[in-house]
Amino acid sequence: MKKILFTLCLILCGLISYGQSAYWKKSTQNFSNNKVVQAETEQYQIFELDLKLLQRELSSGKETRLRMPTSQGSFEEFVVVEKSSISQELAEKYPAIKSYQGYQISDPKSRIALTLTNERIYLYAFSEASEGMRMLSPNTYMFYKISGNQTLSEHISCGVIRDPQP
């Protein structure tokens, strides 16, 4: 009897801890009038983020398993660790800004980098799956498939104008 009770407690604890990592949930909001959504031609899914829960999950300072949505509506698991991308002075001035880097568990060549602030998450995924993420409203994000005809150079412009060489 004690073994059965112990086993049931372990299962219950596992289910509770799994449920606590549900910082992403599928959105029930209607974004059909949103210009970003209307312009998307590839498959996409819209998710809402509990940013405080995600920040709490990542605050351990250790490697953390992170579940990220995909354009198909499934989740991919990543292992991430905090990696500061700003100077120590700025980190002390803006302690809410945290950066993380990691890899996908099922495909370690697929990398992820993300930055969290008090208001939002910035995500950069590097993989052959070519998934993108756009913020639609506070804590609501669209995950979409980047089509083969989009190139990275179309989206990056640092705005620096070079002086002509003498």
Image (cartoon, grey):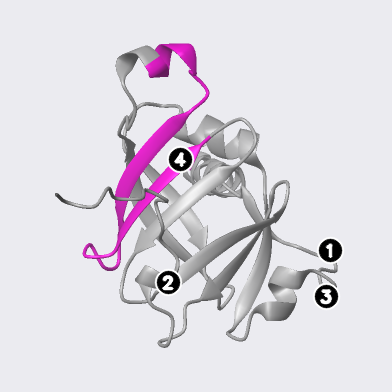
For marks 3 and 2, the one nearer the N-term is 3
Kind of element beneath mark 3: loop
Residue 8 location (% of width, % of height): 56, 47
Residue at left offset 67%, top offset 43%: 50
Tag 4: residue type? Answer: Thr
Q: How many neighbours does mark 1 have within 10 angstroms: few (below 14), some (14-19), or many (20 or more)?
A: few
Residue labelled with disc 4: 115
- Real-space Cα separation, disc 2 to disc 4, in angstroms: 22 Å
For marks 2 and 4, the one nearer the N-term is 4
Residue labelled with disc 1: 29
Tag 1: residue type? Answer: Gln
The magenta segment is 90-116
For marks 4 and 3, the one nearer the N-term is 3
* Towards the viewer: 51 or 162: 162
Left or right position of 150 against 47: left
Q: How many neighbours does mark 4 have within 10 angstroms: few (below 14), some (14-19), or many (20 or more)?
A: some
Quadrant of the rendered image containing residue 157:
bottom left
Residue labelled with disc 3: 32
